[in-house]
Image: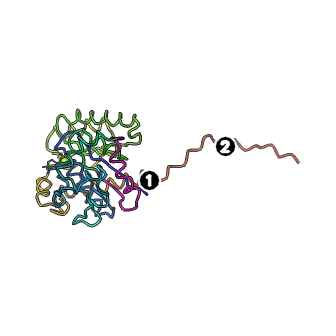
Amino acid sequence: MPARIIALANQKGGVGKTTTTVNLAAGLAERGRRVLILDFDPQANATSGVGLPKTDGVSLYPVLLGERRIEDVIADTAIPRLSIIPAEVNLAGAEVDVPQMDRYLHKLADALRPLAESDRFDLIFVDCPPSLGILTMNALTASDAILLPIQCEYYALEGLSVMIRLIERIRGSEANPRLEIEGILMTMYDQRTNLSNQVVQQVVEHFGDKVYETMIPRSVRVSEAPSYGQPVLLYDRNCTGATSYRQLAKEFLKREAARNAPAAPPAPEAPPPAADTTPAAG
Ligand SMILES: Nc1ncnc2c1ncn2[C@@H]1O[C@H](COP(=O)(O)OP(=O)(O)O)[C@@H](O)[C@H]1O
Ligand SMILES: [Mg+2]
């Protein structure tokens, strides 16, 4: 099976894209999946979040330019089955270089294809920068699905509708008609505030079961973990943040199983005709 490519995207910064990339990826690796994080944000927060340094020339940037092979920029992390293609500051240059290339929206898709089709990874998570520039557009063109982290705050729904319109445009264009919504994740949830609860209620009203039942609470441990170069799942196994991300990994796999389940057999069309009571001739 080819790897499923999932972009973690939202044009807003600070909503939990990187935190979710690192911790959901770690949670899925813990459950036996082979996961690759592609750090596609020049700020390289996912890279430092798994404890790796930023190194010039080690990112997808030279691969996009055709100067390095993708296999050569994949690094292991301290977590079994979790690998990463790190980011570096130079990746920002892609915003300038890539639009000058042919098929510029498809550069990431083309670069990932051999990896996605090899049997090396089950999942590839692309941690996008907080903008709708060329990196994010390439990520959405390359991905099977988008996972949208939404912070439980007043303007959440507005930001979400921008993303949904963009997804519809990408689907309607030749860029990526197959793009699905993997899920919408409510982050930095605080059950004590009416605001958090109202935002969740509104998002669920609009997007129904696309919204994960698991919500990620605001947790100091979650925000401390990156400075130790560790997913919160390792940093403090039993804090609420770690427990929620582990729960999210479980829910993610439940959706995966439902998607892969064979379709239910079609319902019988009409009742069979009543048995003919006339005795057969002869
Ligand atoms: N559940 C959470 N509880 C507390 N702090 C969080 C939580 N999720 C993320 N943060 C913190 O919020 C900031 C932004 O999160 P981040 O994942 O980097 O967002 P993005 O990648 O969307 O910009 C970071 O400092 C991060 O540590
Ligand atoms: Mg980020």
Which of labels 2 and 1 is toward the front? 1
- Pointer 2 residue Cβ closer than 8 Å to ligand 1: no
In this rendering, position of residue 55 left or right of residue 203: left
Q: Tell me the residue that label 2 is attached to.
A: 272
Say few, some or many: other residues with alpha carbon within 10 Å of mark 1 (under 14 / 14 to 19 / 20 or more).
few
Q: Residue 32, relative to residue 133: is it above or below? A: below
Q: Position of residue 171 (x, y in %)?
A: 38, 37
> Looking at this view, is 56 or 44 the one in front?
56
How many numbered circles are shown?
A: 2
Q: Tell me the residue that label 1 is attached to.
A: 260
Q: What residue is shown at x 37% (from left), y 49% (from top)?
A: 110
Gap in Å between the C-alphas at discs 2 and 1?
32 Å
Q: Residue furthest right?
A: 282
Q: Quadrant of the N terminus?
A: bottom left
Q: Position of residue 27 (x, y in %)?
A: 26, 59
In this rendering, position of residue 43 left or right of residue 112: left
User: Which residues, given as a range, are shown in magenta?
Assistant: 102-125
Query: Which of the numbered marks, if any, corresponds to residue 139?
Result: none
Q: Residue 250, relative to residue 96: is it above or below? A: below
